[in-house]
Amino acid sequence: MTSLDSLLRRAAGERAALVDADGTTTFAALTAASDDLADRLRALGVGAGQVVAFQLPTGRPHVTLLRACWRIGAVAAPLHPAATEAEVAALVARLRPAAHVLGPDAADRLAAGTLDAAPTDPPRTVDPALAVVLATSGSTGTPKLVAHTHDVLVHKATQMPRVHGLSPNDVVLMPAPMAHMSGLLNGVLVPGAAQMACVPMARWRPDEALAAIERHGVTFMVGPPTFFVGLMDDPGFRPERVATLRLISSGGADVTPAFVERAADRLGAVVKRTYGSTEAPTIATTTPDDPPEVRATCDGRPLAGVELRLVDPATGTDIGGDGPGELCVRGPELFAGYLRDDGSIDPGRDADGWFRTGDVATLDAGGWLTITGRVHDVIIRGGENIAAAEVEQVLEAHPAVRQAAVVGRPDDRLGEVVVAVVVVDPGAGFDLEACRSWFAAQGVARFKAPEVIEVVDTLPVLASGKVDKAALR
């Protein structure tokens, strides 16, 4: 087994690892700082397989503590920096860490050398093959604790630079929380494996992102459409400010062809779709070499070793043909399982190793995958099933619509009706009549057309950057 500590120590010493408002941190300096912090963890009695919980913003302290955990074989449990005190307390009670640094002043306390031995007696010890436990983000329900091993994360860290064609000359801007898989993978592990610099953002501000891209020569970004729409719509946007951007990888059911085409045109970069989750990071992607129409309309082919199949969401039986159906995944990307509250692991897959993603997809004969929505993101109107993602794609193809999200609203007669929440161009007229005319012109069945239009300045998003459908409802 190659540990993440061993992998990240291979990075060239004096190359820039992190570039932020405090200056440049080289890989050598980052390694030295993480070694010092590892010594402090040992002094607190933290050992292999024990959990360290922390709540830190995206940035240098977060990366340093991650690496310190991996240096001594501890399991890192990063918590979202925006989580409330009650949410953090609930997660800590489930994790039973041996040490923690939490709260709004956590970064300052860590910088001052403060790490607390957690008041858990005894602290939990889990399989030392585990590297990290991530709490899933979502709008409802109790977060799941997703456990990943060193082996899986080393595999992803070394695979993705080859897939994306990344080199030490690239620079990634990372606005996503490093407590999420995208931030962890693309802000810490991939840059370390590729020996490239990361520009972390503790909070998402489009104006600050534009300044960072321009100042640091950012070439690569990963994230949901929200980030890139924010860049394009910022009053300070000018094409020359993003001239160094060459590759954008965006994932989620809300990555529509209209978004990909607009972003490629406005940002002057190759924009491609990709697919993954906390449990199975980046299992499929289009590549920079794929034709533009492919990068805009599907989520790519599975990566090496990944198997995909479609099943009926209700019965779990295979669906013949190209779907749609619920996507199941098997392969080297998969998590170890969900950490139960008693410290054991729920594998989260069936006896044959298949993980049901909860995403609805099509899979054609050529192996091209297209995510069309979530199993539960379906509006049932008068007995007809309407995929929210399908309606969103039609809306975003309208020249006046910048972003769209679709939800169902309870209705006494029909069960549910389709409600569209849209962000439109300033001064553009987009009302229910214009919407229905557009759907008719696109040849879309009348029952799928929205019956309510709400125009907003911005769409609410989850901590992951994805649209918060619960908030819309």
Image: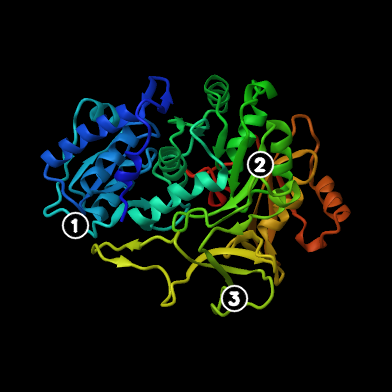
Q: Compare marks 3 and 1 and give the one earlier in the sequence.
A: 1
416 lies left or right of 53: right
27 lies left or right of 389: left
Amino acid identity at mark 3? Asp
Judging depth in this view, the residue of 268 and 205 nearest the camera is 268
Which tag is nearer the camera, tag 1 or tag 2? Answer: 2
Q: Residue at x 53, y 39 (%)?
A: 166
- Say which element carries label 1: loop
Q: Position of residue 4 (x, y in %)?
A: 33, 47
Q: Which residue is mark 2?
A: 271
Q: Residue 125 — which label? A: 1
- Residue 270 in view in this figure: yes
Q: Compare marks 1 and 2 and give the one earlier in the sequence.
A: 1
Q: Position of residue 458 (x, y in %)?
A: 62, 37
Q: CA distance from mark 3 to mark 1?
A: 38 Å
- Residue 424 in view in this figure: no
Q: CA distance from mark 2 to mark 3?
A: 32 Å
